Image: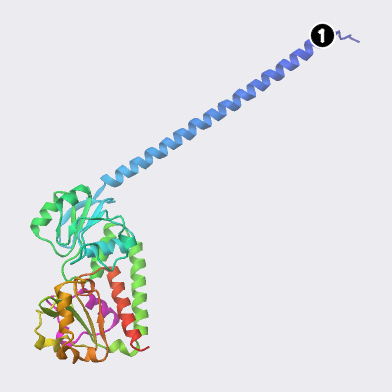
Amino acid sequence: MPITTPVTMSCTRWKINHLKIESCLVMKTLTLSLILLACILLTACDQSQSENTETQRSQDTTLSRPYTDAAGRQLTIPTHPKRIIALSEVDLDAMLALDVQPVAATDGRGQDGFPRYLDDSKTQGITSVGRLGNPSMEAILMEKPDLILLGGFYTDQALAKLSAIAPVVVTYTLREDWKKGFERVAALLNKQEAYDTFMIKYDQKIQQVRKRLGDHIHDTVSIIRWNPKGPMFMYNTVFASKVISDIGLKRPEYQDKGGAPHSPILSLESLDQLDGDWIFMGTLMTQGDAVSAMASATSTPAFKALKGVQNGHLIPVDGSMWTSVGGPLAAMQVLDDIQKAMSQADE
């Protein structure tokens, strides 16, 4: 039987320990290598994702598509516009209803700010570029728009100037139903789902108002704007009249006509043409000559003799909304005004 000397045993233990140390070093080196490789892969992945994001952003701002607007003009517009300016209250209204904010917009009709009926929380952060119909070109240039929405009121000269800044889309024509313009804006912004959702809510609101009105559903509704020189009534082509028609309410015989948006200014001797089962009346501005003239005339015996007044159905409203153009949010407000007025009459 072989005899193991102390020296031999010591050498053997040294070799075993040496192998263990080498094995441990190899494992540590391998682990570090794997960690380093993982870091490299993660960095490369992050960089690739960042490059893809930047590429997508670049594509969003450079891709374009052909488009034919409400005026029949063939244009090339951004596929995904990012800096939109709305130059009518209808376009601003439509964008906000779709939960999209323009970078800038014009003031409301006859107002020193955005339309009164719009919630301040919706317009916060939007820059004013001046008065409706006469915006500041300098202010528009400063906003660096990639798309400009212009509905209804414009001149060829203004259109040419604006088109030199960015593509200009005419979103609706005069006396066109507000729903058509709203649909066009939704298509421009790729917001078809939001449009469908809003219109479902609008139709539900119409049904709700009809139920609340009861017997008043057969009543006639007069829509009046008072000016410094006297009153005028709105014809059935005006925005609010179309909302009333959706409910099923009627307009008085004098007012149930198409063509122009409103009548000539009436004399005090013709106040009977203002009458209806209900009279919704307002001014474009909340103070000034028109307000004073209305207050003076409504105290006269001729005005007090109107059936709508005698029945307590004279309803003051925001004239800038009821007697002008309007969008989806304005339409909802008109429904609220009607429901509140006619529901309270029976309480």
- Along the viewing direction, whichever of 251 and 68 lies nearer the viewer: 251
Magenta stretch encompasses residue 119: no
Task: State the image coordinates of residue 273 (x, y, percent, origin top left).
Answer: 14, 87
Label 1 environment density (alpha carbons within 10 Å; few <14, some 14–19, many ≥20): few
Task: State the image coordinates of residue 204 (x, y, percent, origin top left).
Answer: 37, 75
Task: State the image coordinates of residue 19 (x, y, percent, origin top left).
Answer: 71, 17
Q: Is residue 295 above or below residue 20?
A: below
- Indicate the quadrant containing the C terminus: top left, top right, bottom left or bottom right: bottom left
Q: Secondary structure at mark 1?
A: helix
Residue 133, picture quadrant: bottom left
- Indicate the quadrant containing the N terminus: top left, top right, bottom left or bottom right: top right
> Could you tell me which residue is drawn at 78 percent across and 13 percent down?
12
Q: In this figure, which residue is indicated by the disc labeled 1?
A: 8
Q: Is residue 342 left or right of residue 153?
A: right
- Along the viewing direction, whichever of 156 and 86 lies nearer the viewer: 86
> Could you tell me which residue is drawn at 26 percent across and 69 percent down?
179
> Could you tell me which residue is drawn at 37 percent across and 42 percent down?
53
Amino acid type indicated by mark 1: Thr
Q: Is residue 171 visible?
A: yes
Task: State the image coordinates of residue 332 (x, y, percent, origin top left).
Answer: 31, 72
Q: Is residue 166 left or right of residue 269?
A: right
> Could you tell me which residue is drawn at 22 percent across and 52 percent down?
147
What stretch of residues is rendered in magenta?
A: 238-260
Q: Is residue 166 visible?
A: no
Tally of numbered tags: 1
Q: Is residue 131 above or below residue 83?
A: below
Q: How is the image coloured?
A: rainbow
Magenta stretch encompasses residue 254: yes
